[in-house]
Each structure stands twice: as C-alpha cells, then as structure tokens.
Image (tube, rainbow, N blue to C red):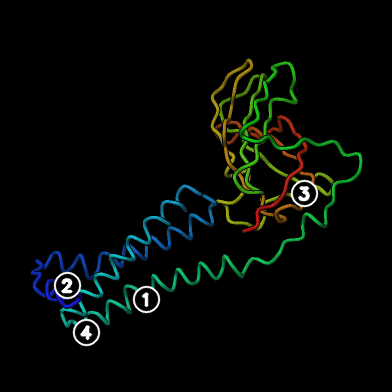
Amino acid sequence: MLQKLIERIKSVKLSEQTKVWLVWLFPVLLIFSTWGLWEAICADNMFFVTLFMVIIPVLALLTGGSLVYLCIKKKFGKAFMFLIFGIGPAALMVVISCFMLMFVNNPDDYGKQHPIPAGLKYSLPLSSADSVAVDSADADSWLRVYSGFQGGIYTYDLYYDKPLAAGTVFLRCFEAVTNDPLTEQGEFIKRRVSYNTKQAVEAGKGFRKLAKGKKFTIYEGDWGDYYAVRVEVWHKAKDGGKETKLMEKVYQMEGWMR
C-alpha cells in the first residue's frame, strides 16, 4: 500500500507555480505563524494564541508533506535547503518559545511578600456568573472588576455620573500598602495595565457606562498568592489634556503564572 502511494506521488505533475508554493510558501507561513504565536503569548491575547495553535499544526503538516514530496521526487538538494531554511527556523522558534514559557519564568513571591494587613477593607473580584446591580447613587458599584479564565487575568466595567471631557479612561494598579506600581514599569508596553485598559470616551455628563469587559493582567505574584491591589481609574482629556484620577477601589488579587 505504501509503495502504491509513493508511485502515485511520483506520477504527480506540478506546475512551476505550485512547486514554488510547496517549497517556499508553507515554511515561510510557518515561521511567521510561530512568531505570531510568541507575540500573542507576550501580549496575553488568548484569541490569537488559540488561532495560531490551530494554524501552526496545519502548516506543519503541509510543510512536512512538502519535504516528503521532495524526497520521493529525489530532489535531495532542494529537500536539504528546505529543511535548513524552512523547517529549521520554524522548529527553532517553537523550541525557544516553549523553553522560555517553561523555564525562564521563575516562581514570583511578590504575593507572599505582601500579605494583606489585618483590618484592611477590600473587595473580591466578581465572577462572570455574578449578577450585581449598578446603583447610580452608590459610587462603590461603578467600578466592577471580574476574574478571568486564569488567575491574574481580569476584566473591568466602568460607570460614571460626572461631566467628562472627550478623551480616554484607563486603570492604574498599585499594591495597596507599599504603593508599588503593578505591571506598569519595566514591562513591554503591550503588557501594561494602563495600555490594555484604555477606553475612548466622548464628552458627556449624567450616569453612563464608559467601559465594559476591558481585559488586563497583573503579572506580579503567582496563582493563589493573594494580596491587596488598589485599582485607580484615570481620565486623560483629548489633545494632550491633563490626567485626572476619578476613583479608586481596593481588591484582593493574584498574579498570573506565566
């Protein structure tokens, strides 16, 4: 049966355009897909992580099939170049990405080093199943932080009732006792809380929703090591206006174990 399959492959006649597709395009797409997967992991974008996790195996099968085709056709020189310059870089990027994810990030004791003081008042993040009414007369209900699908990953909704100029609203997070900025300094810009939580708002007044389901990640600490985080809501007016703090609320939170 295998012999018949090999004979069939040998009998296939391909156009020059198809040969170029087989020999170069699949490995190039595979390289860019592995790079995209790493970028998606760094940016904590689970949609694109999932997308690339589906695309990469398909491209890997097509690339491997192209290599087998070249070998059956006895194009060993092209197969060698294909292996070195096509499959090799993609495989190396996958190995490096897995190595960094598995071994580079050591345990983070930030949560253990910052226990919540006795008597400190804080709120717990809501779950997606929680149904909590927003009270326009209760400012404490205007900022609602929800736990994500993994510890350290959160989303937030924001309501407000005072006049605001056109601009953006965003969050800043601090350890509630030491005032350490969290996920803001010394990190890639795409990881920063203030970057990921930005939401454009139009000028307006009266009680209204300003943000819904904006995702952000706290990187300090590990799963299960809870500490107190002061979540501040800031507003920046359009065209270089000044930044103004609108409200703050303390939550019990944990870091993401990446």
The quadrant the C terminus occupies is bottom right
Task: State whether residue 49 is above or below residue 166.
Answer: below
Residue farthest front in this picture: 1
Q: Amino acid at mark 2?
A: Leu
Pointers 4 and 1 in contact (C-beta within 8 Å): no
Q: Earlier in the sequence, mark 4 or mark 1?
A: 4
Q: Amino acid at mark 4?
A: Gly
Q: Quadrant of residue 103?
A: bottom right
Label 3 sits on a secondary structure element that is loop
Q: Earlier in the sequence, mark 4 or mark 2?
A: 2
| Residue 22 in the image: above or below residue 171 | below
Residue 40 image position (x, y, % from top left): 48, 54
Q: Is residue 82 left or right of residue 117?
A: left
Q: Nearer the viewer, mark 2 or mark 3?
A: 2
Cα separation, mark 4 vs mark 1, equals 15 Å
Quadrant location of residue 68? Answer: bottom left
Residue contact between numbered discs 2 and 3, judged by CB atoms under 8 Å: no
Tag 1 residue = 88
The crowding category of the residue bearing disc 4, from other C-alpha atoms within 10 Å (few below 14, some 14 to 19, many at least 20), is few
Question: Mark 2 — residue?
Answer: 5
Residue nearer the viewer, 194 or 254: 254
Q: Amino acid at mark 1?
A: Gly
Q: Is 17 situated left or right of 54 in this image?
A: left
Determine the CA span between mark 2 and mark 1: 27 Å
Q: Which residue is mark 4?
A: 77
Per the model, the C-alpha gap separating discs 4 and 2 is 23 Å
Dot 2 or dot 3: first in sequence order is 2
Q: Residue at x 52, y 68 (%)?
A: 98
Please give the residue where the numbered disc 3 appears in the rendered image.
226
